[in-house]
Image (cartoon, rainbow, N blue to C red):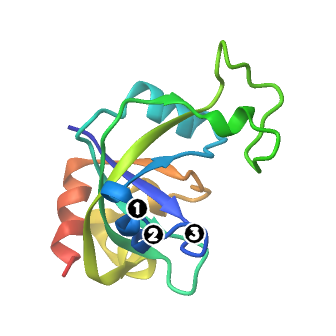
Amino acid sequence: MNYWLIKSEPDEFSIDDLKACPNQTEAWFGIRNYQARNFMRDAMQIGDQVFFYHSSCKVPGIVGIAEVVTQAYPDSSAFDPESKYFDPKSDPQQPRWLRVDIRFVKQFKEIIPLSLIKSLPQLADMYLVSKGSRLSIQPVTEEQWQAVLMLAR
């Protein structure tokens, strides 16, 4: 099993939104970064665990857990001219962009703020705290996963 962190702006799509979806499941789409796409395509597997991270908000941090429930498949928003994720260079026969479906697992009682994550030596090498790290999908090691879980309430 692999572990991941996915970022979402809570005013766009929050963990509460995921929890409210039918079957508490939603397609994770709109990824337009090749490295993040490659993580989905090459490494994400059904059953992988995901930290759900709220970004670009007053207190950014990890708010809960989701699970990957599909393999990567073409992101149809890339072919929709009405979508803000439309990519005119993406070909339906050879899709450039992918999505996976995730399912809600758990919401933490309290956010695990980025400031706390940054302060812990055992998380110093976490992709999230690396300089310049802005990817919306990031790998998390099993050791990092366990360390973050110890902070969750």
Q: Amino acid at mark 3?
A: Glu
Task: Give residue 17's mark.
Answer: 2
Task: Give the mark toward the camera: 2 or 1.
Answer: 1
Left or right placement of residue 67 versus residue 75 in this view:
left
Helix, strand or loop at mark 3: loop
36 sits left or right of 95 in the view: left
Marks 2/3: CA–CA distance: 11 Å
Task: Say if 129 sits above or below 1 in the image.
Answer: below
Q: Residue at x 56, y 45 (%)?
A: 29
- Around disc 1, counting alpha carbons within 10 Å, would you say few (fewer than 14), some (14 to 19), or many (20 or more)? few
> Which quarter of the image is occupied by the C terminus?
bottom left
* Secondary-structure class at tag 1: loop
Q: Earlier in the sequence, mark 2 or mark 3?
A: 3
Q: Which residue is mark 3?
A: 9
User: Looking at the picture, which amino acid does disc 2 mark?
Assistant: Asp
Residue type, mark 1 in image: Cys
Q: Which mark is residue 21?
A: 1
Q: Is residue 150 above or below residue 131?
A: below
Q: In terms of secondary structure, where does tag 2 sit? A: helix
Picture disc at residue 146: none
